Image (cartoon, rainbow, N blue to C red):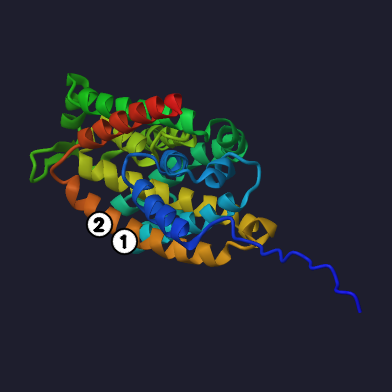
Amino acid sequence: MPDQEARPLIVATAPLTYFQAIVIGILQGITELFPISSLGHSVLVPELLGWDKLVTGQSADESFFLAFLVGLHVATAIALLVYFRRDWADVIAGFFSSIRKRRIDTPAERMAWLLVVGTIPVGIVGLVFEHDLRTIFAKPTAAAIFLTINGLILLAGERLRRRAEVRALVLTHEHHADAGNDVGRDLDTLQLGEGVFIGSAQILALFAGISRSGVTMVAGLLRGLDHEDAMRFSFMLATPIILAAGVYKLPDLLGHDGDHVRGQVLVGSVAAGIAAYLAVRFLDRYFRTRTLTPFAIYCLVVGVGMIVYISAT
């Protein structure tokens, strides 16, 4: 019999390696909580490392990378829930007790409704505009520009919180000074309208390069909170949004976009969850005595540096 023509062996390769999954997972866990923008870094770091498929996938209508990010978001939210588990237990109990009594009496009840009203604006805007904003702006040049803007926002927040108007706001409410002499009003003195103001700042984080935790902390500082309470309220606000974003996109992971990356999702999610827990533990101690200024400088240096790098390549 004549020899049959040899057929080439086609081997499907995963679009995302396990090494990339671990790197992006750690990056997500840290930058989601540090005020330096996880979305911006998930665009800029792959660009810097030459991982072109990941850069393209970030701004695509549908892609394996978006399915991969679902797991990372859920893992980050779980890490926040675990770290603030006692706070969330009090908040949930306070929510139902306030409904039963039809009034707000305790700090836990007030915190519950501050989180509710603070989450509504970004939830609505995110549902309507998140897809369009991501496909337009989740690109390296735009991310570098917005990261630079993020640095300016952090610097402005630190400057504006020292103005007489903010100091007067603090003095008109119950206030305290922590170990670093960072004077701020008590978190449970916030009015619901102020919760809407702080929560609405999260809308800016729909632009790749603007940090969710950074802008909400700045908004909290402008309402007279100290850095520690501004950070705590920021992370409590972020938890349901991050978790909801992951659950909302779960069909992407379970559908064809998740084919060939589900193992990487598991590994990356574990890395993200551990990194996020360690990040929030670090920041909880850091903001007791320190400010946003180092993060602002980082954003300015990296943002401008990436603009120059991208322009030169």
Picture residue at 43% right of the left edge, 53% below the top: 24
Label 2 Cα crowd, 10 Å radius (few <14 / some 14-19 / many 20+): few
Q: Position of residue 91 (x, y in %)?
A: 37, 56
Picture residue at 61% right of the left edge, 38% below the top: 131
* Mark 1 or 2: the one toward you: 2
| Residue type at the position of mark 2 | Arg
**Of the numbered discs in the image, which one, if any, rests on residue 290?**
none
Among the 4 quarters of the image, the one containing residue 247: bottom right
Picture residue at 34% right of the left edge, 56% below the top: 276
Element under disc 2: helix
Q: Which residue is mark 2?
A: 281
Q: Is 206 above or below relative to 24?
A: above
In the displayed orientation, state which residue is furthest to the bottom. 1
Picture residue at 11% right of the left edge, 44% below the top: 178
Apparent side of residue 213 relative to residue 269 in the rendered image (left or right): left
In the displayed orientation, state which residue is furthest to the right. 1
Q: Position of residue 209 (x, y in %)?
A: 42, 34
Quarter holding the N terminus?
bottom right
